[in-house]
Amino acid sequence: MDPDSVKSTLQTLAFGNVMAAAARDYQKEVAAYEKAQTSSSVNEEVDLDDLMDDPELEKLHADRIAALKREAEKRQSLTKKGHGEYREITEGDFLGEVTSSEKVICHFYHREFYRCKIMDKHLKSLATSHLDAKFVKLDAENAPFFVTKLGIKTLPCVILFRKGIAGDRIVGFQDLGGKDDFSTRKLEALLIKKGIIEEKKKDEDEEAEYDESRRRTVRYSGIHDSDSE
């Protein structure tokens, strides 16, 4: 037999063996990978099942439920005290209203003053979204004792009570830019700054729109409507 032919045949056989071995190795790697993936999937399912019975997770869930329950009870308690709405009170109700809640926002107004109507609209809007404070209004004409006692000279006058004690106040629109077209958000920001209500997230500001042709100035018993400023 020709030596060169034998050598060529051996080389061909050797190459074939190498390729076959490589193919077997590749198949083993593919099988090992698929097995690993299957095992990983099973482990994930087991981990999730274990997680459902995790005592720490159960405790977090129970704590969250308890917190929601406390919040609901607090809201119910505040609602019973008149929070969550903008109400009119009388002079006889005044002391009981401002002392029964930790935070009270009281608007002393005159029903004929245009700027008092503007303040009414904004306070009514804020009352429903700020349950942490009570929002009320009192007709200054029908509450001469407290108007004198609190030294109210200009309307609208919004007095902020904390635990029954009168603190900050908003007189007219001096702190709101001095104009009638301020937004509800601007008043809200001022009340937040004064610490009487807490910050709430909103998608957009509520803008107050009023017809300037309705504006008028009315005076009463030495109490000046801030429209005249």
Image (cartoon, helix red, strand yellow):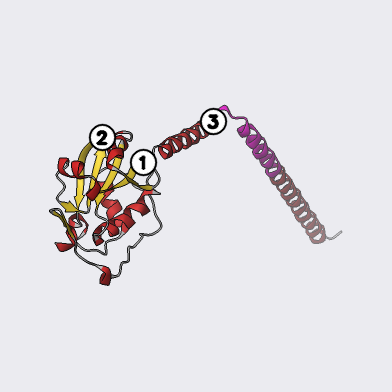
Above or below residue 95? Residue 89 is below
Image quadrant in which the C terminus is located = bottom left
Labels 1 and 3: the sequence-earlier one? 3
Q: Amino acid at mark 3?
A: Ala
The extreme top residue here reads 55
Magenta residues, as a range?
36-55
Q: What residue would you read off at disc 2?
A: 164
x and y percent of residue 14 in the render?
77, 53
Please tell me whether mark 3 sits on a helix, a strand or a loop.
Answer: helix
x and y percent of residue 67 in the render?
47, 33
Is residue 48 inside the magenta stretch? yes
How packed mark 2 is, by other alpha carbons closer than 10 Å (few <14, some 14-19, many 20 or more), is: some
x and y percent of residue 123 in the render?
32, 52
Horizontal relation, residue 139 to residue 26: left or right: left
Check residue 62 in the rendering and tell me which mark sits there, or answer none.
3
Please tell me whether mark 2 sits on a helix, a strand or a loop.
Answer: loop
- Residue drawn at 75 percent across, 52 percent down: 23
Tell me the chief SS of the magenta region.
helix
- Residue drawn at 30 percent across, 41 percent down: 104
> How far apart are the two marked residues, 3 and 2, measured between alpha carbons?
37 Å
Labels 3 and 2: the sequence-earlier one? 3
Classify residue 215 by image quadrant.
Answer: bottom left
* Foreground residue among 187 and 15: 187
Classify residue 151 by image quadrant.
Answer: top left
Q: What residue would you read off at disc 1?
A: 132
Horizontal relation, residue 180 to residue 49: left or right: left
* Foreground residue among 8 and 29: 29
Q: Amino acid at mark 2?
A: Gly
Image quadrant in which the N terminus is located = bottom right
Horizontal relation, residue 168 to residue 5: left or right: left
